[in-house]
Image (spheres, rainbow, N blue to C red):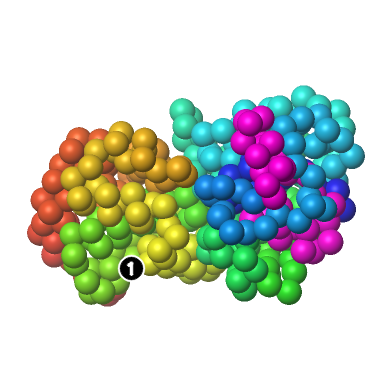
């Protein structure tokens, strides 16, 4: 298989390494010519994945036509805000017209709030689209740490093709027929990871983290079901699995972003200081809009929106969550 990986950040690089381990012929593409030349020359991706060697068999460059030429699969590994523009670029190039297109970003279209696969399906044939999601930090995937994820597709065969493409002895892929649920779960968990980081930054403990994950999953599930997802998807790899990993890991950029918020830094300041993108910030405002549109109560998301965009003190947000009207969990 010839695979073009579009996006030379930490996740694109980790997936390129995984695909190469599985025997694929991989071309790693990046938009920034200076940065991609450095990766090609030094065979390491600094500062995203320091110390991880990139084998010479992986072709590295910034010529998109060359990357796509003859590709059997195209992996779009850029942030959610850039995903649809990259898909449009792929759609306009004939050599990639029959290739499987795998989306890996975790978020929504910035303006419309649509799932990324919905936007992609307007540019390329829907049956060619798959989504890869689940508990998978690039830092660990790049080093071959055993990882399990899920592939979903608009058509079942696309999910199965992605499963075959990515599966190795260290990277196990399940399939899931609920594309809506997979995309919603993996996007919204970043909001809860921001809250978990704030909790850590404020010095709270395991009790608080356990409550955040449990009640966070409850509100993610409520919105997902309202948007047409299946409930059991949220107990799976894209839901509970990714939520746990993102909220507890030292690698989580969203959790780290929350820690910095708790220390009093502004969203703008943290964005300038961070090398990588924390998708949960943009997703928070979008999820709040979706909750209102679907009439779904999402108290943690609401408080996160006020903290991030209205400078509400995190301690005040926590107090407001704890003082909400008492109710039953299950009855």
Q: Give the residue drawn at x 52%, y 47%.
A: 47
- Magenta segment range? 14-43
Residue 228: where, in percent of width, then height?
A: 51, 50
Q: Give the residue drawn at x 23%, y 42%.
A: 265
Q: Badge 1 is on which residue?
A: 214
Is residue 28 on the magenta stretch? yes
Residue 170: where, in percent of width, then height?
A: 68, 72
Q: Give the residue drawn at x 33%, y 49%.
A: 257
Q: Nearer the viewer, residue 103 or 62?
A: 62
Is residue 230 on the magenta stretch? no
Residue 192 placement, left or right of 79:
left
Residue 219: where, in percent of width, then height?
A: 34, 57
**Where is residue 279, by image quadrant?**
top left
Q: Residue furthest right?
A: 70
The answer, for residue 29, to whether it is visible in the render is yes
Q: Residue furthest top?
A: 92
Q: Nearer the viewer, residue 132 or 50?
A: 50
Q: Secondary structure at mark 1?
A: helix
The answer, for residue 180, to whether it is visible in the render is no
Residue 160 placement, left or right of 307:
right
Above/below status of 266 relative to 54: above
């Amino acid at each position: 298989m010839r695979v073009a990986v579009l996006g030379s950040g930490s996740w694109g690089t980790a997936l390129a390494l995984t695909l190469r381990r599985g025997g694929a012929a991989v071309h790693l593409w990046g938009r920034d010519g200076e940065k991609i030349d450095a990766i090609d020359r030094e065979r390491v991706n600094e500062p995203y994945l320091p110390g991880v060697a990139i084998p010479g068999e992986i072709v590295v460059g910034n010529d998109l036509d060359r990357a796509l030429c003859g590709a059997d699969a195209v992996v779009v590994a850029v942030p959610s805000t850039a995903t649809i523009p990259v898909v449009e670029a792929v759609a306009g190039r004939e050599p990639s017209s029959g290739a499987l297109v795998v989306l890996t970003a975790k978020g929504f279209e910035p303006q419309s709030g649509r799932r990324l696969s919905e936007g992609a399906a307007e540019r390329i044939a829907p049956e060619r689209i798959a989504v890869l999601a689940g508990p998978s930090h690039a830092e660990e995937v790049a080093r071959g740490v055993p990882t399990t994820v899920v592939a979903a597709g608009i058509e079942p065969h696309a999910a199965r093709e992605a499963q075959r493409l990515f599966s190795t002895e260290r990277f196990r892929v399940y399939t899931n027929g609920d594309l809506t649920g997979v995309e919603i779960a993996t996007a919204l968990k970043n909001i809860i990871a921001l809250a978990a980081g704030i909790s850590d930054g404020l010095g709270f403990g395991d009790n608080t983290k356990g409550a955040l994950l449990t009640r966070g999953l409850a509100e993610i599930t409520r919105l997902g079901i309202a948007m047409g997802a299946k409930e059991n998807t949220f107990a799976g790899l894209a839901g509970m699995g990714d939520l746990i990993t993102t909220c507890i890991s030292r690698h989580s950029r969203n959790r780290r972003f929350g820690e910095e918020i708790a220390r009093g830094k502004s969203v703008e300041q943290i964005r300038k200081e961070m090398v990588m993108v924390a998708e949960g910030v943009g997703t928070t405002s979008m999820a709040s809009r979706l909750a209102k549109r679907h009439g779904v109560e999402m108290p943690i998301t609401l408080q996160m929106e006020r903290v991030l965009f209205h400078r509400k003190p995190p301690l005040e947000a926590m107090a407001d969550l704890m003082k909400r009207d008492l109710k039953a969990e299950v009855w």
